[in-house]
Image (cartoon, helix red, strand yellow):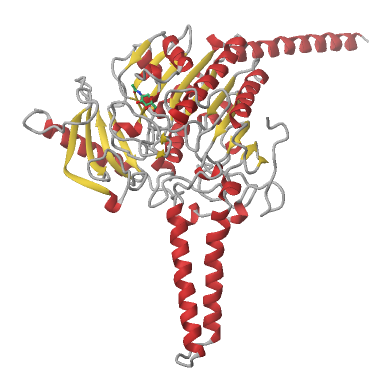
Amino acid sequence: MEHFMHFRVLLLLLSFGSILWLEGEASEHHDKPNFLLIMADDLGIGDVGCFGNTTIRTPHIDQLAKDGVKLTHHISAAPLCSPSRTAFMTGRYPIRSGMATIGRAPVLLWTAGSGGLPPNEITFAKVLQEEGYSTGIVGKWHLGVNCRSRDDLCHHPNNHGFDYFYGMPFTLFSECKEGHGRMIIPDVRIFIWRISEIIGLAILTVVSLRLLGLFVLSWKFILLLVLLYILCISAWYFPFQFINIWNCIIMRNGEVVEQPMALETLPRRLLNEAEGFLQRNKDNPFLLFVSFPHVHSPLFESEGFKGKSKHGLYGDNIEEMDWMTGRIVKMVEDLGLSKKTFVYFTSDHGGHVEHADSSGQIGGWNGIYKGGKAMAGWDGGIRVPGIIRWPGKLPAGKVIDKPTSLMDIFPTVVNIANGQLPTDRIIDGHDLLPLIQGEVPHSRHEFMFHYCGVDIHAVRWHPRNSDSVYKVHFFTPNFSPPGAIGCYDLLICRCYGEFVSRHDPPLVFDISRDPSESLPLSPEVEPRYSEILQRVQEVTEEHQKAVKPVPSQFTVSEIMWKPWLQPCCGTFPFCSCKESNGS
Ligand SMILES: *[C@@H]1O[C@H](CO)[C@@H](O)[C@H](O)[C@H]1NC(C)=O
């Protein structure tokens, strides 16, 4: 009996202790800061009020900058979506994970391609998930979905550290809006069509000659040609005729919930999802990545915004994106989480300067910076708005003009969350806090490599002993028509071959004095000229030697449309569904 009593007391003490322990654990969790990371798509640095635009209204983004830190020299690791987002998610140059284009395809082109962010890469979400965070992404992914089967989800956000995903596994695409024309794929489409034409003609000729008795060829060979013809026609017809069904998709976690997606209701739904995630997770540490489909084309025509800005539909989309940013940040405030939440705002790369239609400009504006999207070396392609707000922890209204990178978010977030940085791989980003808090005078980015696909087009050097920032261009895109600043004839610049010029000696600019890169330096005006060339040359070679070769995710076979990988609701190929509460 006595033993029994003791046992009961012991049990009581134990359970009491475990309650205390659990509570301790919970309040410890409570001290962990939250993260709200916001990324716009194709937004130019010149499109934002607090970065110098006087006619576009972005009051909510401007307020973030007023209450926080503005990064005016914030650089993306690539001038296009898939590679830039890879670098952002992993803190590494995209070439390290094979997410750098090697040829014609500049980004992932199909939801049903097999290329994507390799499963062995570590995203900041994966590290935070291990630290007990709830991790969510709302919006655009564009880093692949499947590897071998329709539902292996090897590249999907759920397999890259995000507990929750709602949004587009792919991206906005011209074909997502009816009658909106075609953007990147026409190349491939026309190429396959040409081949089918040639085979078709060959069949006709061979059959006629054979019928006339002028040519003896086995019917087997002719049959083979016919089969080839049918194959080519289907490769042309099936993927390209239904692009909106294959690529314009909404998923909730691994499930397709809308196919093709309805653009009219998408902004509202994304906002609801972001707000819902914050509400659900208000009592535990969270990381939410809001990855806007704005302001990529095709543009939204949302009620309340259409026709309201001074810059056409493009401006309307910026103002809608700003409004959504404001609503999401307000939700953080309403939940009483402002002081506990690190908020970051950026764009994945520069605005698409060549993009215009009959209504006028529908791509972004990069302010005083030369060039834009798809131009890896010119600052217009890679210098993006950067804002960090963390009231009480980081100064308000501070401006940092030292070079920083989107890749810095990875180590910054991981360090703040007390997570472990991977030690088995190179991380190219650096923790931003020492620079922001003034503990160090210099950016740790003494050098930055500006990749176009797998090639380095330019290198930025910020010598430790000087305020200058030099940029050395080895390659620049060939602008067309001549005299233009941009590749207007092609709609978008390319990285390779006859589309670029090699510079020997390289072009050198001091962008601290000449941010528009208009006056190349010469040995006569720049005493350090030959030192700059030599140092950059050496460091570039060193860097390139240290990049380990990995399988490319952009080979033709990885990129092409594979019906068996197609995310689909319903029975393939009749994929079709509409989200029930899609309003
Ligand atoms: C503001 O942004 C719009 C839209 O991109 C652009 O047309 C305009 O030139 C910008 N204005 C300034 C002063 O940068």
* In-front residue for pair 21/235: 235
Q: Is residue 510 left or right of residue 81?
A: left
Q: Which quadrant of the figure shows ligand 1?
A: top left
Residue 578, horizontal then vertical, whole percent: 69, 40
Residue 431 seen anywhere in this rendered image of the structure? no
- Residue found at the very far left of the displayed protein: 524
Residue 7, horizontal then vertical, whole percent: 85, 12
Residue 304, horizontal then vertical, whole percent: 56, 22
Q: Is residue 31 above or below residue 200?
A: above
Q: Residue at x 51, y 84 (%)?
A: 207
- Corner quadrant of residue 32: top right
- Residue found at the very far bottom of the displayed protein: 213
Q: Is residue 183 above or below residue 524?
A: below
Q: Residue at x 53, y 24 (%)?
A: 305
Q: Residue at x 46, y 75 (%)?
A: 201
- Corner quadrant of residue 520: top left
Residue 340 seen anywhere in this rendered image of the structure? yes
The count of marks equals: 0
- Residue found at the very far top of the displayed protein: 392
* In-front residue for pair 480/129: 480
Quadrant in which the C terminus is drawn: top right
- Corner quadrant of residue 523: top left
Quadrant in which the N terminus is drawn: top right
